[in-house]
Image (cartoon, rainbow, N blue to C red):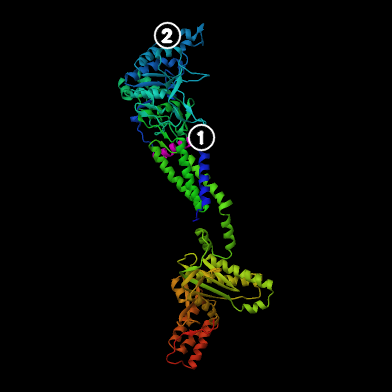
Amino acid sequence: MRRIGKRDIVATILIALLAGAVFTSPPLQGLQGHSLDILTALRGKLVGDRRDPATSPVVVVAIDGETYDTPPFKGSPTLTWTREIGRVLGNVTEGGAKAIGFDVIFPSSIEQSEIPFGDAPLGSRMRGFDRDYLIALRQISDAGKLVLGEILSNDHPDRPYRAQQLAVRTNIRALNVHTDPDDVIRRMPLSFSIEGRPVPAMAVELAARALDGKPELTPSGATELSGYPIPSAVPNTLTLNFRGLGRDIPTYSFADLRACVEKGDRDFFHRAFEGKIVLLGTVLNFEDRKLTSMRLSGGTDGTPAARCALPAPSSTARMVRSDIAGVFVHATAVRNLIDRDAVTELGFAQRSALTIVLAAIIAVAACMLAPGGALIAWFALTAVYTVIAVDAFVHALALPLAEPALASLAALAMMIGYRFVLADRDERVLRKSFAFYLAPEVINGIVASGRMPALGGEMRNVTMFFSDLSGFSSIAETMTPGELVALMNEYLSAMTDIIEAHGGYVDKYIGDSIVAMFGAPADDPTHARNAVRAALKCHEKLTELNAGNPAFAGHGLSHRIGLNTGEAVVGNIGSRRRFNYTVMSDTVNVASRLEGANKYYGTAIMASEATVAQTGDSFAWRELDAVRVVGRGEAIKVFEPLAKNGEESAVQKTVATAYADGLACWRARDFAAAIEAFERTAAIDPPSALFAKRARALEATPPASDWTPVNTLEGK
């Protein structure tokens, strides 16, 4: 993990401020609306509908496709439906409805029609057609239960025709909606200024009548209805809360209600409309469709309510689509006001602060972590924050969602760019330069600490790896300097790649020799196992190079490898002005001696019993001897790795078995039996030939009684 300096702190603050300012700026304010859409969709998917249609204080009477297909409406102009509308609304009022709002406008009457009909216009023959309808409007309006709708516009206002206006007097309210720049309705106006005075919008008027109150302006400028301060992120608007995705609004077909009137079932109207706010509107697939915050959620045009007279349609399920009938926008606003659960949005300052904080968190993560880790941190933070935002939205609080997610992603990109261009430039140079000399873990430690390396070390359990080419001096004499360098570079590169691929660290090159350690600098609990694997692979690779690499042709190179495991001091060792990252201890010396001991036995790899003990049963071994190396008084057992356990060849198994028999006889002083055992494989196995020779010498000249089967190595 990278340390943060003062320059990084300043960069983090500036990046977070810049990202937050950009994504909450006016040109990108559309993101606020997208956040509402996403939250509505996520709440619908993760939490589901929480409102029962039966408890809805508002219902919709729908002039729907069924109405257009049902007599007496089928084939007749809508202007001729007014009598039936009046009859149905009269029964709805008698059923106990608190208020009825019109989301349909009849700008003219059939009585005003100029369509030719015989020798006179149709209108002249229909005089008095709307009389009963207008009387019904007057009676319901006088009872304070009717509100007609109108569309306010400087260019093309849409109002009910004059006779309706006279019938309801002042009970007309605006149906205008608040449309965002992307043509999505997420908020509803609360009032409109008409002739210099504020007049409540249709939804506010209906809710006020249901609550027996009236909207008032508080000293802060907010609108309050019956003690409920209506939250308004955009002045004079209500943010719609589509909690039930449209399924929480019961919907009655106008055709069924008209048939119910004919049937005379007054009890049905009491059951359906008592204490309810009723909205009359068109619910069609091609007319008055609105995009709302449910556009990503698959909202519906209400929930089909119980039928009165007509049989239920073959399919009562509502089509899931991105838009809804306009009447349900007003119905949702009414229910939000009555249930007091309109969405509360954060103000600009709060949204900006929250966006900047999340951008700063990701900027810090991007400053400390690698790009991949920082991206994972962004995904994690965004997921956690989204869960928090959805939970808040369940309680009608809309936290910004799109802005923090995009701002923090931008902060991530900017911080990565800053590190690449400025902050990590020196680090990259350091890593690139010193990667040729130091292990990556050592470089990472220097960079992470931010301090210059110092003298000192620590005790670590490691496995040392020593290798040396056999008879290389005589081979080098026959080569030009260029050929020698090319050969050595090829050999050392191949061996180093194998050592590092198995987790080892090359400490140094000494001519054609390689000194490496496993288990440091990086911790590796299986360092002994990895060291043996590397040794076997190096031996196999040298055979391949001799056979197929032109630089090795004709030289027949062979090498010796010594392995030993134990405690060692690992760290920066040297003078105060110049030191190396290296290793020191008796463990290192023994590994060096075992590398040299291979030439006595004719083996390629020799490991100590400490190394064998730490490898478990991963390899097939044969015990070579018990030796006493130069500089140590204590004897150690040495072993040769044959192959991975279970992968040794038949020849290796035969040689190992014969050798084990001979070694047991040797240690039991039965030299004749030892000779017989060793000579079974002496022709193909140098260690067996060596022990057969020793056994014959001791058989000819028996050792003293205090003889011990330990071979003291005289050289290195």
* Residue 30 - label: 1
What secondary structure is marked by label 2?
loop
Q: Nearer the viewer, mark 2 or mark 1?
A: 1
What secondary structure is marked by label 1?
helix
Q: Residue furthest bottom?
A: 701
Are the residues tagged 2 and 1 within 8 Å (C-beta)?
Answer: no
Nearest the eye: 214 or 240: 214
Image location (x, y in percent) of residue 15: 53, 45
Image location (x, y in percent) of residue 528: 47, 70
Q: Say which quarter of the image contains residue 304.
A: top left
Q: Is residue 157 magenta?
A: no
Image location (x, y in percent) of residue 102: 41, 20
* Residue 704 - label: none
Q: How many numbered discs sit on the rendered protein?
A: 2
Residue 154, placed above or below residue 328: above
Nearest the eye: 452 or 235: 452
Q: CA distance from mark 2 to mark 1?
A: 51 Å
Image location (x, y in percent) of residue 261: 35, 18
Q: Is residue 36 magenta?
A: yes
The residue segment tinted magenta is: 32-47
Judge the density around disc 2: few (<14), some (14-19), many (≥20) Cα neighbours within 10 Å. few
Q: Residue furthest left?
A: 267
Q: Amino acid at mark 2?
A: Gly
The answer, for residue 262, to whether it is visible in the render is no
Nearest the eye: 678 or 460: 460
Residue named by callout 2 = 128
Q: Amino acid at mark 1?
A: Gly
